[in-house]
Image (tube, rainbow, N blue to C red):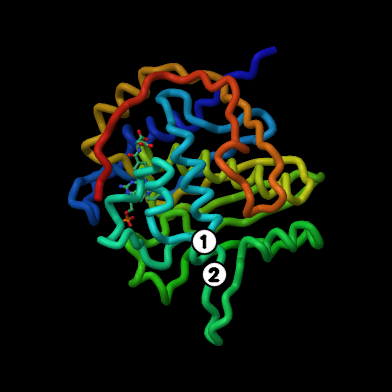
Amino acid sequence: MPERADHSYEDLLARVMAEGSAKGDRTGTGTRSVFGAQLRYDLDRGFPLVTTKRVHLRSVVGELLWFLSGDSNVHWLQEHGVRIWNEWADEGGELGPVYGVQWRRWTAPDGRHIDQIARVLETLRTDPDSRRMVVSAWNVADLPRMALEPCHAFFQLYVADGRLSLQVYQRSCDMFLGVPFNIASYALLAHMFAQQADLAVGDLVWTGGDCHIYDNHVDQVREQLSREPYPFPRLELRRAPSMFDYDFDDVEVVDYRHWPTIKAPVAV
Ligand SMILES: Nc1nc(=O)c2c([nH]1)NC[C@@H]1CN(c3ccc(C(=O)N[C@@H](CCC(=O)O)C(=O)O)cc3)CN21
Ligand SMILES: O=c1ccn([C@H]2C[C@H](O)[C@@H](COP(=O)(O)O)O2)c(=O)[nH]1
């Protein structure tokens, strides 16, 4: 029997449209906003790539590989055709100590560097019941040097019944442009961790703080909400020798049925 289509992202989008409070924001664009929301996807039942518009998976994959490499310069992204971070980079392409740097090289007070991804993977393999499998990009001391403070600030891994789940906390959520990317990115990350630790995949839990729709995305969201979602595609992830050896070619999404692209300006 074919899988039923998931509506949870579209339902949240509709809720922010209908109930969101008018709220100003840093970019001067204006938003409607709801505080606190949660989406849950059983990763075993499909890969949560929004279907009511085309989501450019290659940019999602490129961004995640770039995070995992510990890079903070947009040159590598640009060389691979990913443009989503260009607006925030300085003349040299630098973004400061953003996600990749904090994930792979958090600087301790004594000058050591902590690889949070490697640590959490080690715990996953040796002590999967641990309640301490947390990775934080929210390095308070480093915030002033970042081009943009982390939006997806913190995630936790959890294992039960041989299944790996991941929950991410996103403090600020651009519901139309950013969130479809963020959901797909953490779903892919959960699959990578599970594969490297020989676990099955469980749930992706996405928790949002300030969930907003920018005023200049309202027409696009109305168009999107007029569309009926399709069932999610499937992910085929080729096993890489380590968490840090995945490449574009290892990631394939199969049977992605989707509605056409909807363009929208990004608020800088
Ligand atoms: N306002 C805002 N929203 C965001 O989602 C966001 C930021 N700023 N700043 C940092 C990153 C960059 N992210 C972005 C930036 C641009 C797109 C974007 O323009 N997406 C288009 C085109 C995708 C492509 O060309 O690959 C889309 O249709 O999804 C998506 C995420 C997510 N983040
Ligand atoms: O991965 C991301 C990165 C950024 N966003 C959005 C959320 C906000 O609209 C802006 C960030 O602005 P702040 O004033 O720093 O909150 O970028 C996202 O949704 N996903």
What residue did someone put label 1 on? 70
Q: Are marks 2 and 1 in contact (CB under 8 Å)?
A: yes
- Residue at (27% x, 42% y) in the render: 266
First in residue order: circle 2 vs circle 1: 1
Q: Is residue 44 left or right of residue 57?
A: right
**Where's residue 92, x and y in %?**
30, 62
Quadrant including the N terminus: top right
- For the residue carrying disc 2, how many other residues have a C-alpha within 10 Å: few (<14), some (14-19), or many (20+)? some
Q: Quadrant of residue 41?
A: top right
Amino acid type of the residue tagged 2 in the rendering: Arg
- Residue at (38% x, 54% y) in the render: 75
In terms of secondary structure, where does tag 2 sit? helix
What residue did someone put label 2 on? 105
Question: Measured along the vertical axis of the image, is residue 237 above or below residue 99?
Answer: above
Question: Measured along the vertical axis of the image, is residue 240 above or below residue 67?
Answer: above
Question: Measured along the vertical axis of the image, is residue 224 above or below residue 158?
Answer: above
In terms of secondary structure, where does tag 1 sit? loop
Amino acid type of the residue tagged 1 in the rendering: Gly
**Where's residue 86, x and y in %?**
31, 50
Count of number-bearing discs: 2
Distance of label 2 from label 1 (alpha carbons): 7 Å
Q: Quadrant of residue 69?
A: bottom right
- Residue in the foreground of this view, choosing between 220 and 88: 88
**Where's residue 48, x and y in %?**
55, 33
